[in-house]
Image: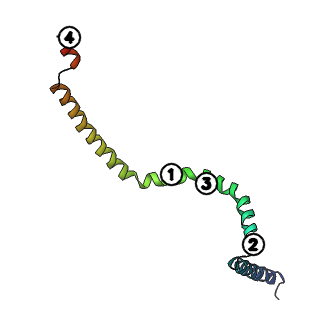
């Protein structure tokens, strides 16, 4: 024997599909009732979206950092090499150029 509860689930699914098709049709035709519904839904869900963004931000940043780890290390190594070259240039320029304050004292 079939139970009556099985038909309720199917009926609910059919009603939801028909309602969604109806709302899509109204939206495509430019009915302004739908825009008010969209605005209300966005206003209601905006705080939830903000909280979700705040909560998931550290997780997203972690995966971005793991993904970029090799690139970051190579960039740091290149910057260290460039820093060493610039330091060598500054030191050689300081040795070649006499200090202007010591020239004035003589």
Looking at the picture, how far across and down is residue 42, in whole percent? 70, 62
Counting residues from the start of the chain, the first of labels 4 and 1 encountered is 1
Relative to 8, is 21 on the left or the right?
A: left
Counting residues from the start of the chain, the first of labels 2 and 4 encountered is 2
Residue mark closest to the camera, 4 vs 1: 4
Packing grade of label 4 (10 A; few <14, some 14-19, many >=20) is few
Relative to 55, is 43 on the left or the right?
A: right
Q: Quadrant of the N terminus?
A: bottom right
Which residue appears farthest toward the front when viewing the image? Answer: 104
Q: Which residue is mark 1?
A: 61
Q: Secondary structure at mark 4?
A: helix
Q: Which mark is residue 105?
A: 4
**Which color mode does the image show?**
rainbow
Which residue appears farthest toward the top when viewing the image? Answer: 106
Counting residues from the start of the chain, the first of labels 3 and 4 encountered is 3
Packing grade of label 3 (10 A; few <14, some 14-19, many >=20) is few
Q: Secondary structure at mark 1?
A: helix
Residue 24, relative to residue 56: is it above or below? below
Q: Which residue is mark 2?
A: 32
Q: Which residue is mark 3?
A: 53
């Amino acid at each position: 024997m079939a139970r009556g509860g099985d038909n309720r689930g199917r009926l609910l699914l059919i009603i939801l599909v028909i309602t969604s098709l109806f709302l899509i049709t109204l939206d495509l035709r430019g009915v302004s009732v739908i825009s008010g519904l969209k605005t209300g839904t966005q206003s209601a869900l905006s705080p939830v979206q903000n909280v979700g963004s705040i909560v998931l931000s550290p997780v997203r940043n972690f995966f971005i950092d793991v993904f970029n780890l090799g690139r970051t290390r190579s960039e740091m190594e290149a910057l260290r090499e460039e820093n060493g070259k610039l330091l060598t240039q500054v030191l050689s320029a300081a040795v070649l150029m006499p200090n202007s304050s010591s020239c004035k004292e003589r």
